[in-house]
Image: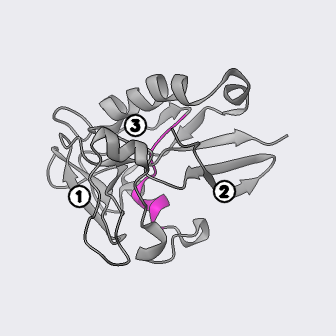
Amino acid sequence: VEPIKWRILEESDGTAFILAELIIDNHRYAASSNNYMNSEIRAWLNNQFYNTAFNDLQKQIILITNVDNSVASTGYATNPYACANTNDKVFLLSYAEATNASYGFSNNISRERITSDYSRSKGAFMNKTAGSEYGNGLWWLRSPNDSDSGLARIVNLVGNVDFNGVRSASCGVVPALKIQLS
């Protein structure tokens, strides 16, 4: 399995907000609802993924983050499916974070992600059309769609923010977390 490569999105006060460079796995969001607080993907990130991906030393520097799940974070003026904030070790980016130029997301190309060999072997969707998007995948955001409880936001093959059905198991995972630097 390839080691996870991380990108620093922000550094301040001895901490860093980091995001995986690749789509490292795939997982369905949930069985039926786009409520991030109660989602399968959130539970998986903070349990199975966290305990498999990080050794004891790495776990010591991972911070518990108060994750903003407000309506504003979803990119909509109103959203009946926004949930309360969560406290997580590992999380997905929100719409607001995935479109934040100060984090390096200044255009669609900056949001494109390549699927890792591991994620492809587990069933992550990969673009197989020759061209600049070859190898790109879809990846989940934690933000719910505003019109249907069965849809959550994703980043598509060409870096556009879109949505997908929460039952889709072929959508990729690009985890984010905060770490203590000093």
Tell which circle, 2 or 1, labels the residue nearer the N-terminal end.
2
Q: Which residue occupies the foreground of this view, 79 or 120?
A: 120
Question: Where the C terminus falls, by quadrant?
Answer: top right
Q: CA distance from mark 3 to mark 2?
A: 26 Å
Write down the residue under mark 3. Answer: 84
Pointer 3 and pointer 2: residues touching (CB < 8 Å)?
Answer: no
Cα gap from disc 1 to disc 3, whole angstroms? 21 Å
Which of the 4 quarters of the picture holds residue 59?
top right
When the figure is inspected, residue 21 is found, relative to residue 119, above or below; the finding is below
- Mark 1 or mark 3: which comes first in sequence? 3
- Residue type, mark 2 in image: Ile
Q: Residue at x 33, y 78 (%)?
A: 131
Q: Secondary structure at mark 3?
A: loop
The answer to whether residue 162 is left or right of residue 3 is left
Q: What numbered label is drawn on residue 163?
A: 1
In the rendered structure, the answer to whether residue 170 lies left or right of residue 181 reads: left
Q: Amino acid at mark 1?
A: Phe
- Classify mark 2: helix, strand or loop: strand
Give the labeled residue for mark 2: 8
Q: Residues within 10 Å of mark 2 (few under 14, many from 20)?
A: some
Residue bounds of the magenta highlight: 90-99
Main structural element of the magenta stretch: helix, strand or loop? loop
Which dot marks residue 12?
Answer: none
- Side (left or right) of 24 relative to 156: right
